[in-house]
Image: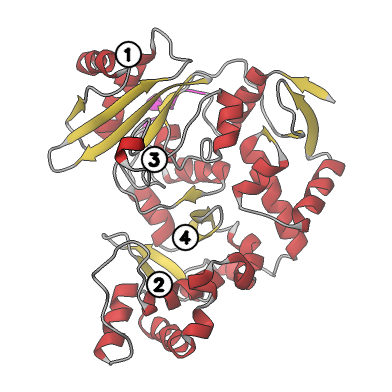
């Protein structure tokens, strides 16, 4: 069994994620080909409605490609022939169209794989599910709000509650999300309010994907586990399975098969007690030289235990933590500098004022003398991509004062 150092494991992980090299600033504007190639490397882009800085699915591509036209992503997922589609993968995610068939077993097993509000919809709202299914077929692409308004006007549902926000779904939304989870309807695109526009699969999926035969369940799990391992480069079975949120005996069987065929190689990583594997396609660069900010929903950082084991940093998203109890801030992005996470910055895009606000800035134990200058330059690039004219640093965190000077210099 090969033994690798922790530093080597970090570089393998960064290379697998396309984060070992500086962003290709001199390569010209990002093309659709480059964008879809990067999504294929990652396998998925996690979707989240939080828009404090930018939508969650937009930032991982910025981290790897630099400033790019986000309209490319809209076209890839919202115009025929689609290269990306939405489904439940890690969580709600954009995935390449070729990955969509591998998740059919999850859509079929909605009673075990979905949570209560979705899994219970066909029992709690059987008549409405049938009605909504027909409305999508007749009117799609259509939003949950439009379906609800039509049902309410016909006296088929109660008025929308205004008392809460977030997961306070209408009956129409519950029915649509059930149909979306099971694959009976899909998201044809997102509108300007980031609402899903639901439509039938035959009007969303490319013909070649619709015509493809079903993938046996065990084969699908094995291929998904392999994709997770390829995206990680090196890691544990838990890491690989978490990429597509796989669980159960099929994962153990898939892991054994991938090891037997040589796709995964057992390795020992310095300081790790858990059994670890390296993908046979993993690349070990001599150095890692990227400098970039990472979204809280970036695949490199979303498994926090893995992040801590690889980079020796503690990181949690604190959106739902009461303000007095936060240690790093509300919407914190790690700063990757080479093969180290050297800083954590709490960022907010103040679009009305045209300001990128650094609400707190903290150094990690791995910060260097170059960290503040590098981070200041990165914030300048990020602000430009977001269309924000200036950057303002609040006096919160041990890095704030030095960073304010670096921002002025940038």
Numbered tag placed on residue 318 in the rendering? 3
Labels 3 & 4 near each other (Cβ < 8 A)? no
Label 2 vs label 3: CA separation?
32 Å
Label 3 vs label 1: CA separation?
26 Å
Label 3 vs label 4: CA separation?
35 Å
User: Is 308 above or below relative to 352?
Assistant: above
Q: Which of marks 3 and 1 is nearer the N terminus?
A: 3
Q: Which of marks 4 and 2 is nearer the N terminus?
A: 4
Label 2 vs label 1: CA separation?
46 Å
Q: Which tag is nearer the camera, tag 4 or tag 2?
A: 2
Q: Is 328 in front, or is 207?
A: 328
The answer to whether any part of residue 386 appears in the image is no
Q: Which of marks 2 and 3 is nearer the N terminus?
A: 2
Labels 2 & 1 near each other (Cβ < 8 A)? no
Q: Is 81 in front, or is 99?
A: 99
Q: Is residue 48 left or right of residue 356?
A: right
Q: Which of marks 3 and 4 is nearer the N terminus?
A: 4
Q: Which tag is nearer the camera, tag 2 or tag 3?
A: 3
Query: Where residue 71 appears, x then y in whole percent?
Result: 33, 50
Report crowding for label 1: few under 14, some 14 to 19, many 20 or more residues within 10 A (C-alpha): some
Q: Which tag is nearer the camera, tag 1 or tag 4?
A: 1
Query: Where residue 357 appears, x then y in whole percent?
Result: 22, 32
Residue at (22, 22) in percent of width and height: 395
Q: In this view, does 220 lie to the left or right of 32?
A: right
Q: Give the range drawn in magenta.
A: 21-28
Numbered tag placed on residue 198 in the rendering? 2
Residue ID for mark 1: 373
Numbered tag placed on residue 301 in the rendering? none
User: Is 148 above or below relative to 352?
Assistant: below
Q: Earlier in the sequence, mark 1 or mark 4?
A: 4
């Amino acid at each position: 069994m090969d033994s690798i150092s922790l530093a080597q494991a970090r570089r393998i992980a960064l290379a697998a994620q396309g984060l070992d090299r500086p962003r290709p600033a001199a390569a010209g504007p990002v093309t659709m080909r480059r964008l879809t190639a990067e999504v294929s490397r990652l396998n998925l882009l996690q979707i989240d409605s939080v828009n404090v800085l930018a939508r969650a699915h937009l930032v991982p591509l910025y981290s790897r490609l630099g400033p790019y036209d986000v309209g490319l992503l809209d076209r890839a997922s919202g115009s025929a022939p689609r290269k990306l589609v939405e489904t439940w993968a890690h969580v709600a995610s954009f995935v390449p169209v070729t990955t969509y068939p591998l998740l059919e077993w999850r859509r079929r097993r909605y009673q075990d794989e979905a949570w209560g509000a979705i899994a219970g919809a066909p029992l709690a709202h059987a008549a409405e599910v049938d009605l909504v299914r027909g409305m999508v077929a007749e009117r799609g692409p259509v939003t949950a709000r439009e379906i609800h308004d039509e049902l309410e006007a016909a006296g088929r549902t109660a008025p929308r509650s205004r008392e809460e926000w977030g997961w306070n779904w209408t009956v129409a939304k519950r029915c649509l999300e059930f149909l979306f989870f099971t694959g009976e309807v899909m998201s044809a695109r997102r509108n300007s309010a980031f609402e899903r526009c639901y439509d039938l699969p035959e009007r969303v999926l490319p013909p070649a994907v619709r015509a493809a035969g079903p993938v046996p369940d065990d084969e699908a799990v094995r291929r998904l586990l392999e994709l997770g391992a390829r995206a990680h480069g090196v890691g544990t079975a838990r890491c690989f399975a978490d990429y597509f949120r796989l669980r159960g005996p099929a994962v153990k069987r898939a892991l054994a098969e991938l090891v037997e065929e040589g796709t995964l190689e057992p390795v020992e990583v310095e300081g790790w007690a858990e059994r670890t594997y390296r993908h046979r396609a993993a690349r070990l660069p001599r150095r890692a030289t990227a400098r970039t900010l990472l979204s809280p929903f970036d695949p490199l950082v979303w498994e926090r235990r893995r992040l801590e084991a690889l980079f020796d940093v503690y990181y949690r998203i604190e959106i739902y933590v009461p303000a007095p109890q936060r240690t790093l801030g509300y919407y914190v992005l790690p700063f990757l500098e080479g093969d180290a996470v050297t800083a954590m910055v709490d960022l907010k895009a103040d679009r009305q004022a045209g300001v990128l606000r650094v609400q707190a800035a903290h150094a990690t134990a791995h910060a260097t003398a170059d960290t503040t200058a590098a981070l200041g330059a990165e914030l300048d690039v990020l602000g430009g991509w977001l269309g924000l004219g200036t950057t303002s640093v609040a006096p919160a965190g041990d890095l704030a004062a030095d960073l304010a000077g670096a921002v002025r210099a940038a």
